[in-house]
Image (spheres, grey):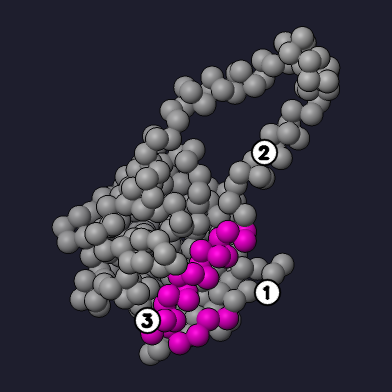
């Protein structure tokens, strides 16, 4: 599938597409089993009418809630406070945009915008950079096993690319892909050797990519030369010293040419360990 190389990890045990399609056929086909439905107090017409709403209800009950994402980020930021990587954190008010304000020594205020899976429009384009932010990062917390992590990232970057070349005033300093699934049996992480214990769990360092900035075309961070300061701070909370932060920090690049706009997504996960996806 397109974009698998955009992240260094793969899911383990995710159902193949043909199995997912078969399950969908079985669920849809229940409407043609009137006796089965009758035994459960439903008619075929009632089942067909209620099926879309039932699917949405199931999606809502199984998807990670906003509270789950807040709890995970809160745990990470509490750890960063405990080890001295940040001086304070201002957490978002419930019901407001989920933007965290981190006070980082020698840098200033850094904004972390909490989002879900990156392939959704809300998670990739519905954000703005706070006026107080020295650096701003979109943090994707994605529990979905429907696609490989790289595919999720690739879809999100595609949306960000369209915004980057639009009239939208704001741009990001970077993106982060990380949640409690990372490093688990379902999403093994090649950075587990650098995992630290947080909240009773072994959690690997996040995947971080530095985004390009406008005004540097036609090759916008195409070779990854743009430098940002917060990635090293975040990685320091995972016992990565400043000298090694660069080997765990990837980058996003755009190249505008006569044939259109190309994208590069380079992921670094250790000395000499790199995956690069271009489209």
Cα gap from disc 3 to disc 1, whole angstroms: 25 Å
Q: Residues within 10 Å of mark 3 (few under 14, many from 20)?
A: some
What residue would you read off at disc 2? 58
Q: Secondary structure at mark 1?
A: loop
Q: Name the dominant secondary structure of the magenta segment.
A: helix
Q: Secondary structure at mark 3?
A: loop
Q: Tell us which disc is closer to us: 1 or 2.
A: 2
Q: Tell us which disc is closer to us: 3 or 1.
A: 3
Region rendered in magenta: 66-90
- Decide which of tag 2 and tag 3 comes sooner along the chain: 2
- Decide which of tag 1 and tag 2 comes sooner along the chain: 2
Can residue 49 be seen in the rendering of this structure?
yes
Q: If the image is split into quadrants, where does the C terminus sit?
A: top left
The residue at 40%/53% (across/down) is 182
Cα gap from disc 1 to disc 2, whole angstroms: 27 Å
Answer with the quarter of the image where residue 195 lies: bottom left
The residue sitting at the bottom extreme is 106
- Decide which of tag 3 and tag 1 comes sooner along the chain: 3
The residue at 38%/85% (across/down) is 84
The residue at 37%/39% (across/down) is 12
**Vertical position of residue 203 compared to residue 278: above or below:** below
Q: Residues within 10 Å of mark 1 (few under 14, many from 20)?
A: few
Residue situated in front as seen by the camera: 40 or 243:
40
What residue would you read off at disc 1? 93
Q: Position of residue 238 (x, y in %)?
A: 32, 70
Mark 2 in CB contact with mark 3 (< 8 angstroms): no
The residue at 65%/68% (across/down) is 97
The circle on residue 83 is 3
């Amino acid at each position: 599938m397109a974009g698998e190389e955009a992240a260094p990890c793969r899911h383990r045990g995710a159902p193949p597409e043909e199995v997912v399609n078969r399950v969908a056929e079985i669920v849809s086909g229940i409407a043609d089993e009137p006796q089965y439905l009758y035994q459960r107090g439903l008619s075929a017409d009632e089942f067909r009418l209620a099926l879309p709403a039932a699917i949405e209800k199931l999606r809502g009950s199984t998807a990670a809630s906003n509270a789950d994402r807040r709890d995970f980020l809160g745990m990470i930021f509490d750890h960063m406070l405990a080890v001295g990587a940040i001086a304070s954190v201002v957490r978002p008010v419930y019901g407001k945009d989920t933007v965290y304000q981190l006070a980082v020594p020698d840098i200033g205020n850094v904004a972390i915008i909490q989002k879900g899976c990156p392939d959704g429009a809300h998670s990739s384009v519905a954000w703005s950079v706070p006026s107080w932010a020295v650096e701003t990062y979109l943090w994707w917390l994605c529990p979905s096993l429907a696609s490989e992590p790289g595919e999720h990232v690739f879809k999100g970057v595609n949306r960000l690319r369209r915004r980057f070349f639009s009239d939208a005033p704001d741009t990001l300093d970077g993106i982060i892909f990380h949640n409690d699934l990372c490093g688990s049996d379902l999403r093994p992480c090649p950075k587990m050797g650098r995992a630290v214990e947080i909240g009773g769990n072994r959690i690997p360092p996040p995947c971080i990519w530095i985004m390009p900035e406008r005004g540097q075309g036609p090759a916008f961070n195409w070779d990854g030369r743009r430098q940002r300061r917060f990635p090293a701070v975040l990685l320091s909370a995972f016992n990565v010293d400043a000298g090694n932060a660069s080997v765990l920090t990837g980058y996003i690049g755009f190249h505008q040419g006569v044939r259109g706009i190309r994208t590069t997504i380079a992921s670094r996960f250790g000395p000499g360990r790199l995956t690069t996806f271009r489209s």
